[in-house]
Amino acid sequence: MTNTKTFNKEASILALQNLATQVRRDILRMVHGVKSGHPGGSLGCADFFVAMYFEILNHSPELFSMDGYGEDVFLLSNGHLSPAWYSVLARSEYFHTAELSTFRKLNSRLQGHPATQEGLPGIRIASGSLGQGLSVAIGIARAKKLNNGPNLVYVLMGDGETQEGQVWEAAMYAGAKKIDNLIAVVDYNKKQIDGDTDDVLPMGDMKAKWKSFGWKVLETNGNNMKGLLETLHKAIKATGKNIPVIILMKTEMGYGVDFMTGNYKWHGAPPNDEELANALSQLEETLGDY
């Protein structure tokens, strides 16, 4: 069982940063290999996925079960970030890294959006139909309470996803029912498939909105490993106090690759051969490519 601990050694932070760099290489190669997928948000959230699976979550690849009994549960609501999740699951030994080469191919367990019928370890719900993940997370959190389980439920959403009405129904419910074993995270990169979120549908003051729905709101830089870990640990300490917790995690779409960073056009566009070579030249191979 992977347990949370206080990260205060620079060597440990560096190890996580190096792993995140390798995950970014995995993401780019996976999307390029099948000429489809969503590299932008995946690159931006690579640090988050590494932090979660190698530092924060109480989880075990060997003991994985669909009901999540006895361990923390993580859900990816914005399922198009699957390349980042698959890479981290593989490098956490839920399955062999060689399987990453099957991403989005026919009969693969690694579908473009996470699915359950293929039986991929680590995946508990099909996701990518945006707006639904928070509702499912609340249901799992309530089940854990009913079972007197001590573990937490985490869910990652996109900021463009919060334009969906179901998100706010769920937010209202969690606040009203004091769901305090839940930590939600919003990838707050202010980009979505059609452009800046402020151009598509402005969300206004996100911090004030979530607070008004009865949530404790934390903010962090999702591309700074040390600060991200500190905020995640603060979120854990804030659980169990009759209030749901949310982290507004500011990231850069395409982070790690200069020509992709901050550019919404890379939300769902694969790099060509030349672009892949350029991108990989900016990301050192740290653990070995699959």
Image (cartoon, grey):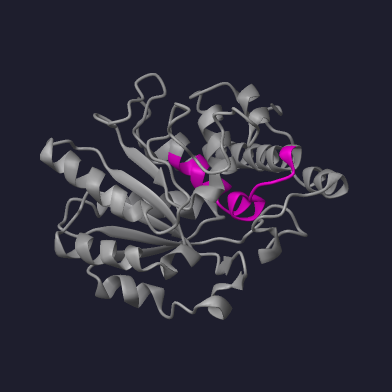
Is 216 displayed left or right of 112 in the figure? left
Residue 215 seen from this side: no
Q: Give the quadrant of residue 178.
A: bottom left
Q: Give the quadrant of residue 223.
A: bottom right
Q: Give the quadrant of residue 217.
A: bottom left
Q: How far from the left and from the top, in percent, is residue 89? A: 51, 32
The answer to whether 151 is drawn above or below residue 261 in the figure is above
Q: How far from the left and from the top, in percent, is residue 261? A: 69, 61
Residue shown at 69%/26% (left/top)? 290
Residue shown at 71%/29% (left/top)? 289
Q: How far from the left and from the top, in percent, is residue 101? A: 68, 29
Is 53 displayed left or right of 146 in the figure? right
Residue shown at 18%/41% (left/top)? 143
Residue 279 seen from this side: yes
Residue shown at 67%/37% (left/top)? 26
Q: How far from the left and from the top, in percent, is residue 164? A: 40, 67
Exactly how many numbered labels are in the figure? 0
Is 118 displayed left or right of 247 in the figure? right
Where does the N terminus fall, quadrant-wise?
top left
The answer to whether 9 is drawn above or below residue 192 in the figure is above
Q: Magenta stretch?
A: 34-52
